[in-house]
Structure formats: structure tokens, C-alpha cells
Amino acid sequence: MKSTFDLSGAEWTKSTHSSGNGGQCVECARNLAAATGAVPVRDSKDPRGPVLAFTTNGWTSFLSAVASGDLHAH
């Protein structure tokens, strides 16, 4: 995976479950995964801020853990 890549073609989306949560959302650009091997993720409140990139496998594992309730706030 590249350490940097072009985000100009990113199609940022956030979950439909994120409405009504006070703006505590992240957006991801899954459309870049095939070309880069990574899923860029950013804070929806700060679209010009930093972007984290997760491997496609890592992002899928994270989403599965969230959906199954395996992640708990401490």
C-alpha cells in the first residue's frame, strides 16, 4: 500500500446511521479501495483535516466488529 495517494477523486460518504448523533461522524471513500488497497477515512466535521487510511481488510474487520457489538467504550 502507498503511504500517500491522490484523494481528488474521493467520493466521501457516511453511514445513514449517523444522522441525529450530534455530528460525531466519519466519512470514508471506499471508491478508492480498488486502486489504492486502502480506505481513506476522515472526520465529517473537518473535511480538510487529516485523513487516515486503513487497509481494505482492516476496514472490513473494523466494520464487522462495530456491527457485531464487539467494540465497547471504556
Image: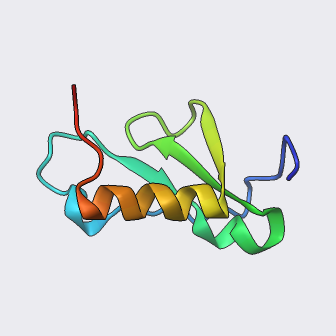
- Residue 60 or residue 9, whichever sits in front: 60
Q: Position of residue 52 (x, y in %)?
A: 62, 39
Q: Residue at 85% of width from left, 41% of height from top?
A: 3
Is residue 39 toward the left or the right of residue 25 in the image?
right
Position of the C terminus, as image quadrant, is top left
Position above or below: 67 against 3: below
The colour scheme of the drawn protein is rainbow
The residue most toward the right is: 2
Is residue 54 toward the left or the right of residue 65 in the image?
right
The residue most toward the top is: 74
Q: Position of residue 68 (x, y in %)?
A: 27, 63
Total numbered labels: 0
Q: Residue at 32% of width from left, 56% of height from top?
A: 66
Q: Residue at 28% of width from left, 64% of height from top?
A: 67
Position above or below: 13 against 49: below
Q: Position of residue 48 (x, y in %)?
A: 57, 35
Is residue 21 toward the left or the right of residue 25 in the image?
left
The residue most toward the front is: 70
- Residue 27 or residue 67, whichever sits in front: 67
The residue most toward the left is: 20
- Residue 32 visible in this rendered orientation of the protein: yes
Q: Residue at 15% of width from left, 40% of height from top?
A: 22
- Residue 14 visible in this rendered orientation of the protein: no
